[in-house]
């Protein structure tokens, strides 16, 4: 028998989540257009976003966060933009949707970095939001009021940062005003350079690529997380790495949406910091994100062990070290020593495993979930592979899904 202490690993931070999209996982895998793409998927996503309310958001996020804990995530950064009622009017409590997410995190026991998203325009030229985007929108003053309200909820399990949806959706002046008002300890996240048409539109309107534009105009540093950053030129790769910012790579979603492959090896060679996110939740598993991050690189480069280096030749350990190094800045949680996973010593995949090969055995030995226990802040949240409230959470999720699919 192995000593259980040998099968313990730090919890993983999930740097990018849109909780409501968990409810549409698997529902967009049919052809709607001869050239299906991110942009046709987005139409379906908008229809789904229109159905969410605070109750269904709570039920869906609770199921999602319980699954995250079962899979080994102990922190989630929630990039939250569905703020208002479907017609765009604020709820009586303008933070009702944010509070639903905070309640789901508190009740399941995952650490939450809530990132309310500023979303103002429908394109680089300041186009107005479309009817379906109305419930995402704020002006700067309204957004700052929401931030202020949410920051009062912070405690040792909840951090409040801020997010800009993308450079398409937030004018430069609005970004500056928010950053001036934002406390220095708040993480800042934004989607950037996920799709080639976004890079082309930025070049056409601003004469610069999105990352190039951002790095020249803003003091991007360790508090920033750039989500996706898929399409980069060599200067942008070096520029992000030198800034100290984190790139949140979301391999299963980027594959699902046909985004492209992040230039991982060049970025690591430049000393870049990175983490992973499950984003649209077509998969809720750090194993799958990290495995496909590495496998994508192998398929493209015709090499093996791409994320490994001279200093850390073991690829699993190199991957886990990468996600651990960026988590405090990207999430705002500095002390997560009590966030631990215990892998299942009874699993054949781990027979004879020890500290020397545990990371590789976890990440590269099949699909049976191997997390047996998850503790967050020392508290047991997953026992014998199941969230301690799994049944009640799943029952509530089933009711919410019936409602969402009926409406
Ligand atoms: Zn996203």
Image (cartoon, grey):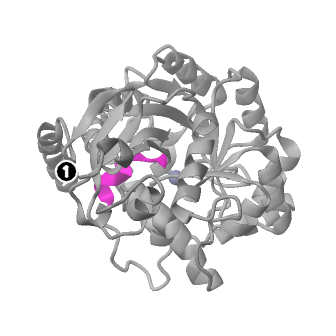
Q: Nearer the viewer, residue 168 or 343?
A: 343
Q: Is residue 319 left or right of residue 241?
A: left
Q: Which percent across, then down, holds residue 346?
A: 21, 56
Residue 116: percent from left, percent from top: 53, 33
Q: Which residue is tagged 1?
A: 401
Q: Is residue 243 left or right of residue 198?
A: right
Q: Is residue 279 above or below residue 98?
A: below
Q: Is residue 22 magenta?
A: yes
Residue at figure coordinates x 66%, y 24% from the top left: 185
Task: Report the number of numbered marks.
Answer: 1
Question: Is 380 on the left-hand or right-hand side of 200?
Answer: left
Residue 201 visible in the snapshot: no
How crowded pointer 1 is (Cα within 10 Å; few <14, some 14-19, many 20+) is rated as some
Extreme-top residue of the structure = 152
As rendered, which of 200 and 392 lies closer to the eye?
392
Residue 160 is situated, as x and y percent measured from the top left of the image, at 53, 26
In-image side of 18 versus 208 (left or right): left
Residue 308's x, y, as percent?
63, 65
| Residue at x 78% of width, y 32% of height | 176
| Residue depicted at 69% across the width and 35% down the height | 223
The segment highlighted magenta reads: 16-26
Compare residues 128 and 407 and report the one nearer the observer. Answer: 407
Residue 33 to residue 346: above or below:
below
């Amino acid at each position: 028998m192995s000593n259980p202490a040998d099968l313990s690993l730090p919890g993983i931070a999930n740097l990018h989540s849109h909780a409501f999209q968990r409810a549409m996982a698997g529902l967009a895998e049919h052809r709607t257009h001869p050239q299906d793409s991110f942009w046709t998927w987005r139409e379906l996503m908008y229809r789904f976003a229109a159905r969410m309310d605070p109750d269904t958001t709570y039920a869906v996020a609770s199921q999602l966060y319980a699954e995250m804990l079962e899979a080994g995530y102990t922190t989630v950064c929630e990039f939250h933009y569905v703020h208002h009622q479907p017609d765009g009017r604020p709820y009586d409590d303008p933070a009702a949707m944010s509070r639903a997410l905070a309640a789901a995190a508190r009740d399941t026991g995952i650490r939450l970095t809530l990132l309310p998203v500023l979303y103002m325009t429908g394109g680089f030229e300041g186009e107005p939001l479309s009817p379906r985007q109305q419930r995402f929108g704020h002006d700067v003053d309204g957004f700052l009021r929401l931030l202020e309200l949410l920051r009062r909820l912070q405690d040792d399990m909840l951090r409040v940062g801020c997010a800009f949806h993308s450079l398409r959706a937030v004018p430069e002046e609005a970004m500056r005003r928010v950053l001036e008002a934002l406390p220095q300890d708040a993480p800042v996240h934004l989607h950037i350079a996920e799709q080639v048409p976004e890079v082309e539109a930025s070049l056409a309107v601003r004469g610069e690529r999105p990352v190039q534009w951002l790095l020249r105009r803003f003091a991007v540093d360790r508090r920033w997380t750039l989500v996706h950053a898929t399409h980069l030129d060599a200067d942008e790769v070096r520029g992000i790495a030198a800034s100290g910012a984190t790139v949140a790579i979301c391999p299963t979603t980027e594959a699902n949406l046909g985004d492209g492959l992040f230039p991982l090896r060049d970025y690591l060679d430049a000393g870049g910091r990175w983490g992973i996110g499950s984003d649209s939740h077509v998969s809720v598993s750090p194993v799958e994100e990290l495995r496909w991050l590495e496998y994508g690189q192998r398929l493209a480069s015709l090499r093996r062990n791409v994320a490994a280096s001279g200093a850390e030749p073991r690829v699993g350990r190199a991957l886990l070290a990468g996600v651990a190094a960026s988590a405090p800045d990207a999430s705002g949680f500095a002390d997560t020593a009590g966030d631990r996973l215990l892998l299942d010593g009874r699993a054949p995949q781990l027979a004879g495993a020890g500290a020397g090969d545990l990371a590789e055995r976890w990440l590269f030995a099949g699909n049976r979930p191997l997390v047996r226990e998850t503790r967050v802040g020392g508290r047991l949240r997953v026992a014998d592979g199941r969230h301690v409230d799994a049944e009640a959470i799943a029952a509530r999720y089933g009711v919410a899904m019936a409602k969402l699919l009926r409406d």
